[in-house]
Amino acid sequence: MKIGIPVLNEKGLDSTLSEHFGRTPFYIFVAIEDNKIEKYELVRNPFEQHGPGQIPVWVKENGIDTMIVKGIGSRAISFFSNLGIKVVKATGDNAKVCVEDYLSGKTDDTDPGCNHNHSHEHHHGSEDECKKQYGVVALTLKDKSLDAPIDERFARGKYICIINAENGAINFLENNPEEEHGVGPKLIGFLSNKNVNTIIAKSLGQNATTAANESGIKTFEAIDGTGTENLQKLWNGELRTL
């Protein structure tokens, strides 16, 4: 058996799991013999920009038969399934814990495409707890209202809205980027200084994605709609990770 895991850093089996399956900077491939870790290899993600199915095919070419992930879209799961690769939801925050839990049968049976660790039947009774796990949330809007449409130009969105998911506080900031280049990573740095834990965006550039990963900020793919609609989707666990 050979297991693949997307990770954020180069710390071997202690590497931190990535929230972003496709845009992770590294993968760790773990060979299993007699239900024990025999060896591992940490490799850089060769696809900075990837097309549908590219990463699953590459993973298959590397002999992987099981993927352990924190978050993944249903389309990617389908690609893996068609290649005979099993997708399992991660149970820990580093590669070693996830592999050991998997080998001992301590798997998370929830949908790997879901970002929550509870059943949907239980979800509605614990929405406040779901909100808290996202901490401080940021998104860019076309007007100074949560009822305004999400701005698809994340770093150049007209207004930055910052929501404290725990106490409900909302703050709007006007966004006037003057630079032609590098505004994405600069905005990520600004949001990190504002203690933002979660970003909702239509898309992020590669440099902004890297900056978010390095800052420990989770990023989720926005839907076409208002800020309010996107937040509700986030609370319900219905937004995919970027």
Image (tube, rainbow, N blue to C red):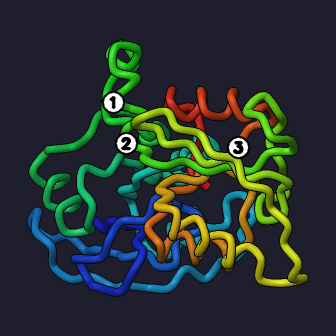
- In the picture of the structure, the residue carrying the numbered disc 1 is 129
Distance between mark 1 and mark 3 Cα atoms: 21 Å
Distance between mark 3 and mark 2 Cα atoms: 18 Å
* Tag shown at residue 195: none
Answer yes or no: do the residues labelled 1 and 2 have beta carbons within 8 Å?
yes
Distance between mark 1 and mark 2 Cα atoms: 7 Å
Quadrant housing the C terminus: bottom right
Quadrant housing the N terminus: bottom left
Q: Residue at x 50, y 58 (%)?
A: 196
Q: Residue at x 20, y 52 (%)?
A: 102
Q: Residue at x 45, y 53 (%)?
A: 85
21 displayed left or right of 129: right
99 displayed left or right of 49: left
State the SS at label 1.
helix
Q: Amino acid at mark 2?
A: Gln
State the SS at label 3.
loop
Q: Nearer the viewer, residue 12 or 116?
A: 116
* Tag shown at residue 222: 3
Q: Position of residue 205 (x, y in %)?
A: 74, 71
* Residue 7 in sight from this viewpoint: yes
Q: Nearer the viewer, residue 178 or 115?
A: 178
Of the two numbered discs 1 and 3 on the same chain, state the one appearing first in sequence.
Answer: 1
